[in-house]
Image: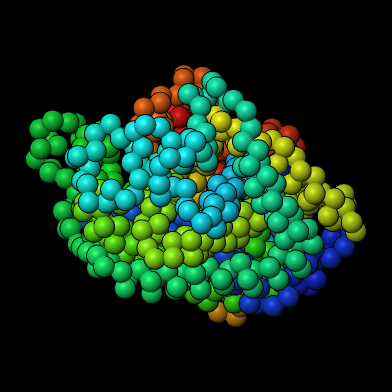
Amino acid sequence: MHFAKEGALLYGLGMNKEQRKTKESDGKPRGKWANKTEYLLVVAGNVVGLGNVWRFPYLCYKNGGGTFLVPYTMFAVLCGIPLFLMESVIGQYTQEGVVTCWRKLCPLAQGIGYGFLVIKLYDFTYIVIQAWVLLYLIFSFRAQIPWANCGQSWNTDNCVDLEQSNMTVGNLTNTTSAAIEFWERRALSISGGIEELGSVRWDLALCLLACWTFCYFTIWKGVRSSGKVVYFTAVFPYVMLLVLLIRGVTLPGAWEGIKYYLYPDLKHLAGFEVEHCMETMCIAQCLICFLGTIQYDCYDKVWVEAGSQIFLSYSLASGTLIVLGSYNEYNNNCYKDTFLLCLLNSGTSFVAGFVVFSILGFMAERKGVPVDMVADSGPSLAFIAYPQATALMPLPQFWTSCFFLMLILLSVDTHFVTVECFVTSVSDLFPKHFQAPRRSEIFVLLICIASYLIQLILVSEGGIYIFQLIDYYGCNRMCIDIMAVCQCLTVGWIFGKRIHQCTSERADRMYDIIEEMMGTRPCFYFKLCWKYFVPLLSMGSFIVYMGTYTQMEILSTYIYPYWAHVLGWIMTLSSIIFVPLFAIVQICLGTGPLRQVSVSYVIFVLVVSYHITIS
C-alpha cells in the first residue's frame, strides 16, 4: 500500500454500498446473526459479567452509597454510551474484525487492532475464574459444606467455623475463618510466592479443561453456534439473580445491608479540602489529588473508580463490540441497541447490589458485627464472604449452588465472546487460510488446546500470583485509556473521505455512515464526546493512574520481586506499543510525500509515543 493513492494510508479505500452489504471472504461467507435477538443476547451476556456482581455493589458502598451513582451516570453519559455506539458502528459498517476494520477507516491506525489482539490474549486468563467457580459449585453439593466448618485435613489449629457467629472479630485474635482456609489452603493451595510455582492442582486442571471444552463447542461453528447457546447462558443468570434477590430481601438483617449499600454520603463527591492541599502540595499534586489519588489521602477516588467501572463493564476499548457488531445486518439500528444494552448493563449492576448486600446484611446480623466488616469485592466476595453467608441459611447447598451457577454463567458468556473476537479478527486477517470449510473449526480447536496447556501454570500452587500479575498489568486501565484516546482521535479528528477535508467534515463522516446505515442521524452531542470528552477524560484517568501507581501486593503480605514488576510493565507496553509502531513503520514504507499525512495523525502518534515513554 502506497501514499500514491490520495490519502490511502490515512483514510482507507472504503467500499461501495453493495460490497458492504454482500461482503464475503475468499473462502466461505463470513456469517451473520440469525436474528436480532441473538445479537442482543450475546452482547448482553458479554457486558453483563462478574464485575456487575462483585465489583459495582462494593464500589457503590465504598464511595458514598447512592452518591456514587452521580459520577457513575456522568461517565456512562460522557464516555460509556458514545464509545459503545462508535465501536458498534465501526464493526457494522466495515463487517470486519478489530484489525482489518481499520484498513477501511484509517490504515495507519491498524496498530489499535493489533493492540486489541494482545489484550484479548491476556483476557484468556480469566477463564481460570470459571475453574474456581466450578470447583466451588461441585463442593456445594456435599452434605456438609466444607467452608462452613473446621476439622478438615487442610484446616489449621487457628481455624474458626461459622458456628461461632456470636463472637465479634475483636474476640478472635490470630484466627482465620473456615472459608478463608478453604479458599487459600484447599482450593488454591497457595505457595509462598511467584518463585514457588509448585505442582499443578489437578482438580482445578480438570475444571479448567471442562471450561475450555464448553468454550470450544460454543464457538466452533462461529456465530451459528454461539448465537444459540446464549439463549440459555445469557438469560438464566437473570433467573438466578431474581431468585437470590427474593431470598435476600426476606432475610433478617437484609435491609441493614441495603442501607449500607445505598446510604448517601455526600462528602465523597465534595472532593478534598482545597486549602489543606494548597498548604501541603503543589498545584499539580492537587490536580492529581482531585482526580483521585491514594498517596495524598485527599480523595477516595470515586470519580476514577466510576470511570473504570463504566469502561470495564461496558467492554469498551477492547475490540469486543467491533467484532460483535460486524455480524449485524448492514442496516441494523445499532443506535437504539446502544441505549438498550447500556441501560441493561447498568440496571443489572444496580439490582445485583441488592442481592449482594441483602445477604451480607444477614450475615452481619448472624455474626454480630457491622456490615462493613463483612463487605468485600472481587474474589474475596465470591469465594469467602458470600459462601459464608449462604452457608448460614436453611438449605445452604441450594442457595450456594444457585450463586455459583449464576457466577459461572456470567463468566462463560464473557469468555467465549473474548475467544470468538480473537478468532474472528485473526480469520479476517487471513481469510483464505482460516475461513475455508473445516479449517475454522480446526483453528478454534488449536487455540483452545494451546490456551489450556499454557494456562495449566495458572492452576498450580503459585498460579494465583501469575494470575494477579496479568490482571494488574496485562489488562489494566492504562491500556484501555490509551486505546480509547487512539480510537477517538482516529474517528473524531482523522477519518474522512478526502484528504483536503476540514476537521469538522472529517468528524461528520461517522455521522454520514450512521445515517446511511440506519436512516437517522445522531445528535451533535456524540461528536462532542468522540472529539473532546472521551479523550480528555481518558487522558485524565491515565495521568491519575501513572501518578498513583503503586507496586502490587497480594494477601496484604506478599510483595512481588522486582523482576515480576518489570515483566508486568512489558505486558502493559506489549499492547499499546503497536499503535505508534505500526503507524511509524507504515509511514516509513510509504512512497508518497509525508505532507499527505495529516498533522493531527502525526500529533496522535507523538502523543501515544510520549505516553509509552513516560510509562
Vertical order, 120 against 420 (above or below):
above
**Residue 614 visible, this orientation:** yes
| Closer to the camera in the image, 514 or 259 | 259
Foreground: 219 or 604? Answer: 219
Percent position of residue 226, x then y: 71, 65
Q: Point out the residue furthest to the bottom here.
A: 519
Q: Position of residue 321 (x, y in %)?
A: 59, 60
Q: Is residue 61 left or right of residue 92?
A: left
When the figure is inspected, residue 506 is found, relative to residue 204, above or below; the finding is below
Can you say whether 381 is above or below 82 in the image? above
Taking the spot 24% from the left edge, 34% from the top edge, the residue there is 173
User: At x 40% / y 42%, what residue is drawn?
Assistant: 150
Is residue 9 left or right of 337 when viewed as pictured? Answer: right
Rendering quarter of residue 560: top left
Q: Nearer the viewer, residue 142 or 509?
A: 142
Image quarter where the C terminus lies is top left
Q: Is residue 264 left or right of residue 35?
A: left
Locate residue 360, reporting x and y percent. Answer: 31, 58
Coloration of the structure image: rainbow
Residue 291 higher or lower than 507, as above or below: above
Total marks placed: 0
Q: Depth check: give the residue in front, 199 or 270.
A: 199
Q: Residue at x 79, y 62 (%)?
A: 221
The quarter holding residue 498 reads bottom right
Q: Does the rendering let one see residue 482?
A: no
Q: Which residue is drawn at the image coordinates 62% and 28% (left, top)? A: 199
Q: Quadrant of the N terminus?
A: top right
Q: In this rendering, would 612 be left or right of 452?
A: left
Residue 38 placement: quadrant:
bottom right
Whole-percent x, y for residue 406 in the image: 52, 63
